[in-house]
Amino acid sequence: MLEVRELRLVQAVAEHGTLVRAARVLGVSQPALTRSLAALEAKLRGQLFERSRQGVIPTNLGRTVLAEAADILARLDRLDSAVAEVRGGQVRELRIVAGTYVGETLGHRAAARMLSVYPATRIRLIAGDWAEVPRVIHAREASLGILDLRGHEPDPGLVVERLRPQPGVFVVRRGHPLASRPEVTLADILAFPLIMIGRLPQAVQGPMAAAREAARAAGRAHPAFPAMIQDSPSVAVGLLRHCDAVTAATLPVAHAALRAGDVEVLRWRAPWVSLHPGVARLRGHALGEAEQGYLDLLRDVDREVEQEGQAWLAELGLSAECG
């Protein structure tokens, strides 16, 4: 008899096309996945996939297993949701995984509103690298994920809803040498220590690397790039009070420090200094009441933050364009 984990393995290999990508999504090593697949094929006494350098293609046996697996796994997901719904007054748990920037810009505000709307739901917020969000969802460690879509490759196993792009700016402590300048360049910014998250989307890496090279050629680049890696943008903003560093932030992340007068916005921004958030969930997964409620609240927050950000940048005389 086949086990659920074996059905999920076959489904992941078929959805992602290679053992390497499937192993990454399932959170196992490729050799371990290869051994598990070989053991399953031995159990079934037949080959499930044709292997080549380009990837894998299901055999007739593989297609038969996949057709039944899709229905069985979808029913199991619906059963999990139904059981959670009928457990009456018992506390249910909603798990949400988010990249730190999108989590602190949108996800946490929506989660806070859940506390009064769904008092019988325990919310578990899982913060991490935005690139790991799909793996966490596929591993069913969370039912919803929020990430920056600029670095996300299309995944047939996920349903992804695009949210509104959110502009970002560079911020510094009050009284910073750059704060009083009416005009600032990116080379000026890179002459100071930069606090960044550990992994950036390629759309951000490219312009930053080019500007770094230009600043270095002009003898104006800070020696360490970045000077500090801090995966929480809110923490990075808080650190600015104690040094001459620069960091990028969205309005929700920087709002409290701006209102307190601890930080100031530099008079420079480009469209690529932005977030392109999206929310992802497993394809075929039936949403529970709490999951649907969180999505509705997230969409409300998304609209509010966009309006606040545009008004904020207009007041500063900066473009709100996101690219």
Image (cartoon, rainbow, N blue to C red):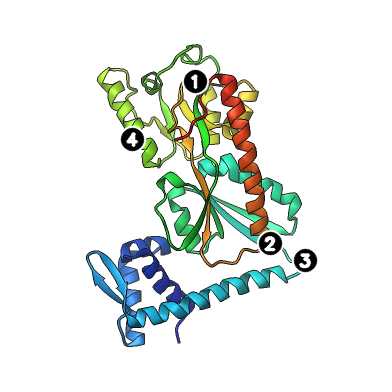
Give the mark nearest the N terminus, 4 or 1.
Answer: 4
- Quote the CA–CA distance across marks 4 and 1: 21 Å
- Quote the CA–CA distance across marks 4 and 2: 41 Å
Q: Amino acid at mark 4?
A: Gly
- Quote the CA–CA distance across marks 1 and 2: 43 Å
Q: Amino acid at mark 3?
A: Gly
Judging from the image, what secondary structure is the residue with disc 2 in? helix
- From the image, tell me which residue sits under label 3: 89
- From the image, tell me which residue sits under label 2: 289
Looking at the image, can residue 236 be seen?
A: no
Judging from the image, what secondary structure is the residue with disc 1 in? loop
Give the mark nearest the N terminus, 4 or 2.
Answer: 4
Residue lying at the far left of the rendered structure: 53
Give the mark nearest the N terminus, 4 or 3.
Answer: 3
- From the image, tell me which residue sits under label 4: 206
Q: What residue lies at 65% left-to-right and 64% top-to-bottom?
A: 288
Give the mark nearest the N terminus, 1 or 3.
Answer: 3
Q: What residue lies at 52% left-to-right and 33% top-to-bottom?
A: 167
Judging from the image, what secondary structure is the residue with disc 4 in? helix
